[in-house]
Amino acid sequence: MECGGWAFERANTLYPDVDETAVAMVVLAKIRKVVPTALRQRIEEALLRAEVWVRAMKSSNGGWGAFDKDNNRKAADWLVSKQNPDGGWGESCASYMDESFRGAGPNTPTQTA
């Protein structure tokens, strides 16, 4: 299947995710009627690719994972393994560049929310 998704940030060039793709789809759907005619076809094609991709990302239990389908149990197990003793989670943007930082660090509001 052709990827039709958008990624979270510029450094993430390999893993588009469903929630960012949904936001991009909403924006594109709103602007497609006001952009120059030359761009409308490109927007329509991007929306179609995105819709096909998002539908393909639907998990067998009916939900969607952010980056992969049918990963809910694996994700839950990983979250539990990374939870800090006080119940929170920590991580920084450094984890995008260095795997050793993934799921590690002091609690942060954005990771614990």
Image (tube, grey):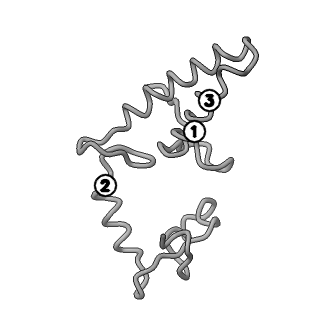
Q: CA distance from mark 3 to mark 2?
A: 32 Å
Q: Nearer the viewer, mark 3 or mark 1?
A: 3
Q: Is residue 36 left or right of residue 88?
A: right
Count of picture labels:
3
Q: State the residue at coordinates (38%, 68%).
A: 79
On residue 72, which mark appears?
A: 2
Q: Are marks 1 and 2 in contact (CB under 8 Å)?
A: no
Disc 3 element: helix
Residue beneath label 3, please? 30
| Residue 78 image point, x, y percent | 36, 66
Residue positioned most to the right: 36
Q: Which residue type does callout 1 highlight?
A: Trp
* Crowd band around label 1 with a 10 angstrom C-alpha radius: few (<14), some (14–19), many (20+): many
Using the image, determine if residue 79 lies above or below residue 2. below
Label 3 vs 2, first from the N-terminus: 3
| 47 vs 104, nearest the viewer | 47
Element assignment for label 2: helix
Quadrant of image for the N terminus: top left
Instruction: Quickly name the residue at label 1.
Output: 6
Which callout, 3 or 1, points at the residue further toward the start of the chain?
Answer: 1
Mark 1 vs mark 2: which is more N-terminal? 1
Which residue type carries mark 3? Lys
What is the CA distance from the residue labelled 1 to the residue labelled 2?
21 Å
Q: Nearer the viewer, residue 1 or 26?
A: 26
Secondary structure of the residue carrying tag 1 is loop
Residue 33, image x and y in percent? 66, 19
